[in-house]
Amino acid sequence: MRNAEILVTLAVFGFCCFTFANSLKCYSCYSAKDCKKPSRLECNADAANKTRDYLNALYTGVPGTNFTSQSFLCMRDWLKTSSNEFIYKGCVYSNYQSCSYAVNPYYSQRHERKCAQCNKDGCNPAARANGSLLTVITTIVATVLVKCVWRN
């Protein structure tokens, strides 16, 4: 009987951890000024579409709107041209190869670029059990409810 209680408690805890910690969170900013204090956002289709719009403005070969994915990566991009400097951080669809797209011919003369996609190293990877206040509270409440139901 005691083993069953432990198993149910562990199952509820595991479910809560993975339910609340399955989204990738990335820094987000759109300019040098913004990127001094970037915000963190949870990746979703809207955020990835904004990144696609940014990529389309500066690069060629970016896939169209029907090329999406259910998973995401974080991306950071820096492009310095003879006339401007572009800095961007955000979410991107995981099937995009953001750093491999060619610079738009308008900007291609004399440019420098640094780009990276990641799902770790400063990013919160998807499907990782991260401790959070919401997860801890939900687990405690669920455990108490399971024990109450189990005793009746």
Image: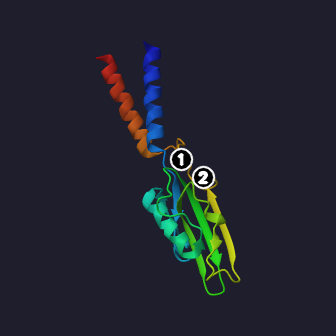
Front-lying residue, 87 or 35: 87
The image shows residue 151, relative to residue 47, as above or below, that is above
Front-lying residue, 151 or 102: 102
In the picture, the disc for residue 7 is none
> What residue did someone put label 2 on?
119
Q: Quadrant of residue 134?
A: top left
Q: Residue at x 54, y 43 (%)?
A: 128
**x, y (%) of residue 103?**
64, 75
What SS does tag 2 mark? Answer: loop
Q: Residue at x 58, y 62 (%)?
A: 75
Locate the C terminus and report the quarter of the image it occupies: top left
Toward the left, the furthest residue is 152
The image shows residue 124, relative to residue 100, as above or below, that is above
Q: How many marks?
A: 2
Circle 1/circle 2 CB separation < 8 Å: yes
> What residue did someone put label 1 on?
126
The amino acid type, in three-letter code, at marker 2 is Asn
Judge the density around disc 1: few (<14), some (14-19), many (≥20) Cα neighbours within 10 Å: some
Locate the N terminus and report the quarter of the image it occupies: top left
**x, y (%) of residue 111?**
69, 80
Whichever of labels 1 and 2 marks the residue nearer the N terminus, that label is: 2
Question: How is the protein colored in the picture?
Answer: rainbow
The amino acid type, in three-letter code, at marker 1 is Ala
Q: Residue at x 65, y 71 (%)?
A: 102
Judge the density around disc 2: few (<14), some (14-19), many (≥20) Cα neighbours within 10 Å: some
Horizontal arrangement in the rendering, residue 114 relative to residue 20 (left or right): right
Instruction: Tell me how far mark 1 sits from mark 2, CA to CA.
Output: 8 Å
Toward the top, the furthest residue is 1
The image shows residue 65, relative to residue 21, as above or below, that is below
Horizontal arrangement in the rendering, residue 142 relative to residue 105 (left or right): left
What SS does tag 1 mark? Answer: loop
